[in-house]
Image: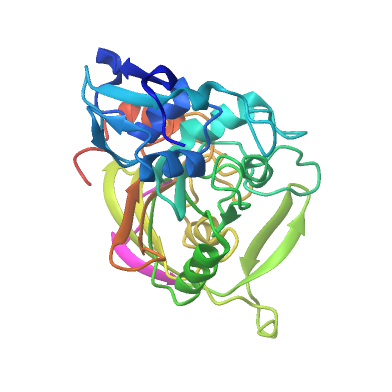
Amino acid sequence: MTDTPSKVETLRVGDGEADMRLDRWFRVHFPEVGYTYLQKLLRSGQVRVDSKRAQANDRLNAGAEIRVPAIVRQPKKSGPGLQAPPGVSKGDRDTIEKMILFEDDHVLVLNKPFGLAVQGGTGTKKHIDAMLEGMADRFGGERPRLVHRLDRDTTGVLLVAKTREAAAKLGRTFQTRSAAKTYWALVKGVPKPPQGKVEAALVKASGPDGDRVRKAKPGEQDVAMHATTHYSVIDRAAHKTAWVSLKPVTGRQHQLRAHMHLIGHPIVGDNKYEGDLHMPAENIEKKLHLHARRLVIPHPKGGKTIDVTAPLPDHMRRTWELLGFDDEKFE
């Protein structure tokens, strides 16, 4: 059945909403409308912008008129809705929404904050994986799947697949090392030479401060994990500390943290690899200064490339300002 004028309303885009994506505008004004349902409304022409058909990722102009069928204001009688599943609060859903750097029908890229675990573990009750699972209605009905991992205290780009097919393809891309990952870190001292490669096999080890890894010893080849990291010094503050770009070839647990420690330049704030001892300057927070800055990876549907950059977290931005580093100068 087509909508009659009495079943349609027109809303005007406010000045403060200029350049907002249409799907984000709907999440603000109609949080009960899931992404898949919005796509259905757009494909059928029930939602229009300035009387024209639109797409979910279209950018809005201030004053634009959005045609909205009245049905979107009616609560659904069945199926997933705005009510968060047990264990996933409205606040959790808002937290995930604020993390989104990029989204389409197949992929979600998040900007992971400091201190939030990616997956559950001993003593970990709140983590991104569970928060995403509780938002399956928002992301198309399927359970979103993590494609890779970041440590709890590492910030930045985190890739999530919205479908089983996308997860499988992206997983194979990571396995074949076709994903280009760039991390930014602050390390103690200045590495010499300023550009280099660290190749050191790693093995898991346990300690009083929890799991960590160390360099493999002779005779441990059967359990050792080959690991390679390229590093490059971007800027430095005297001889005390350096801003480095890190590009892992492999993706081992704690690889970047362990490799920088092995060459005598632990990452500042790293409480597992001596980066929190003898801080290089006063007023630097004792938080891990490791940030997944950029990810470049072929799109799972082909034809284009996903290229996403995450802004520095607050604690690293304050450190950069303290040391006189310009994060916009060295993109």
From this viewpoint, is residue 268 visible? no
Vertical position of residue 57 compared to residue 64: above or below? below
From this viewpoint, is residue 55 visible? yes
Using the image as rendered, state which of residue 290 and residue 77 is in the foreground. 77
Indicate left or right for 221 with 256 as reference. Answer: right
Vertical position of residue 252 compared to residue 7: above or below? below
Q: Which image quarter: residue 301?
A: bottom left
Using the image as rendered, state which of residue 106 and residue 184 is in the foreground. 106
Residue 94 at x, y percent in the picture: 55, 27
Q: Identify the residue at image location x=45%, y=56%.
A: 106
Residue 320 counted in the magenta span: no
Q: Which image quarter: residue 101?
A: top left
Indicate left or right for 253 with 239 as reference. Answer: right
Residue 123 at x, y percent in the picture: 80, 41
Vertical position of residue 207 compared to residue 156: above or below? below
Q: How many marks?
A: 0
Residue 180 at x, y percent in the picture: 36, 64
Q: Identify the residue at image location x=47%, y=37%.
A: 1
What's the colour scheme? Answer: rainbow
Q: In this picture, which residue range is highlighted in magenta? A: 187-198
Vertical position of residue 252 compared to residue 16: above or below? below
Using the image as rendered, state which of residue 35 and residue 144 is in the foreground. 35
Residue 220 at x, y percent in the picture: 69, 81
Q: Identify the residue at image location x=28%, y=39%.
A: 54
